[in-house]
Amino acid sequence: MEDNDFRNGNSKTNIFGSNRMLQPAPWDIIPEEPTNPDIAYQMVKEETFPQTQPRLNMATFVTTYMDDYATKLMNEAININFIDETEYPRIALMSAKCINIIANLWNTPDSNKWKTGALGIGSSEACMLAGVAAWLRWKKKREAQGKPFDKPNFVISASYQVVWEKFSQLWQIEMRQIPLTMEKPTLDPHDALQKCDENTIFIVGIMGITWTGMNDDIEALNDALEKFNSKNNLDISIHVDAATGGFIYPFLYPEKKWDFRLKWVTSINTSGHKFGLVYPGLGWVIWKTKDLLPPEMSFTVNYLGGEVTQVGLNYSRPAAQILGQYYQFIRLGFNGYKNIQFNSMSIAGYMHDEIGKMTQFKNYSAEIVNPLFVWYLDPEYDKTAKWTLFDLQDKLSQKGWMVPAYTLPDNIENFIVMRTVVRQGFSRNMADMLLGDIKTAIIDLEKFQYPTQTRIDHNNKIKIATKIFNHNGIRRDK
């Protein structure tokens, strides 16, 4: 007699007619028995349903769209471990080709056939590698001079990405922050140099500040540093954290000097999985010349079937993203990248203008320099508003959008801003939908008769800050 008891799971089992659908998903103990693959797939997939769809996530900088061929190519390489270079030498060569392409986009002066760089799981690892290289160079020089090398430091604006805090803590290198103000929203070269001394391993300039989308003026910093180094007989360098801008400026503003054309820029990192247009995670770091990468950062092993030399904090790493990056370079070419970045900038500019027209808001910057921007409640409107941007964030999330609201760094932390990042896959039509949902949400929020909890909390915070600081932002007890 045919067995019709499908509920326990077999090839004929209907997913939602199975016993497994009556049981909770495991959270602490692995199930005793296997589960049919289609049922297991459904259980994992449905846990992601309540999340924002990636292309509606205006918070992330990370690529959320690649074409079908890129996705197919990366999926076919999902089982390849990049570090097995002797088994997959052509992928190692492909990585070196990508490093060459990026180095030349940044106007490297290196005449060697193969430029000096490394890949990382993301731009954070790339930052770490650049930092370690600068620290080791500084340490070696101090040792040769017979000087102490126990108190290294680096200088960066308070709008740093969290990886720099990790770098400071993990390697015990003092991070000297330059506070920001509404009048000085990016790194001020004069203020940065005030923090420099013989123990400074480098100054970090940022192209595409995560908090605001703005850029530090790298050329002005380089010019000021030239005078400072000459006067003080120092050779402090600049590292450019171009996680965002590194794949924007070569295509849209090739005339702007922020890269290796500047004397004191010795290393640059970028994120392949941001405006490099590759799915996560992939980062790149390039050094101006080979001598800037200390040899002790290269590790060689031979247990994978042959000698492998690697520069990186991680060891095993996926190869798929390298294929994705090389594919994008071939598929899009210079003009393809230029067109995509131009569209992203144009749509961001359109949204910036439309947001600026809304009486409730004020844009943080007068123009956009990367495909992202932030805005805040107009100070006059804010005086009587019963809601904050945190409430607007919540309203938009109900429509599927993730548009983050957050406070700015120390010294201007009382400003709540909202940010939108425009990436490949976000169209003008989607921008109009988002703007429409913002306007609808504001209509609902303005109907509130009483302040929201976020408004009450924010007002209390402002009152406390007013008691502690004077109108110039200086503590009254100092």
Image: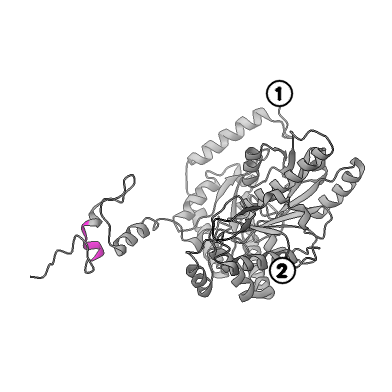
Categorize mark 2 by other alpha carbons within 10 Å: few (<14), some (14-19), many (20+): some
- Say whether residue 266 is left or right of residue 58: right
- Report the amino acid beneath label 1: Asp
Residue, disc 2 = 251
Considering only order in the chain, which callout, 1 or 2, is on the residue closer to the N terminus? 2
> Which corner quadrant holds the N terminus?
bottom left
Task: Please tell me which residue lies in front, 400 or 146.
Answer: 146
* Quarter of the figure with residue 427: bottom right
Q: Is residue 200 above or below residue 308?
A: above
Confirm whether the magenta stretch covers residue 95. Answer: no
| Residue 452: percent from left, percent from top | 48, 41
Residue 368 seen by the camera: no
What kind of secondary structure does the magenta stretch mostly adopt? helix
Residue 382 occupies quadrant: top right
**Amino acid at the residue labelled 2:** Phe
Foreground residue, 240 or 288? Answer: 288
- What residue would you read off at disc 1? 477
The magenta stretch is 14-19
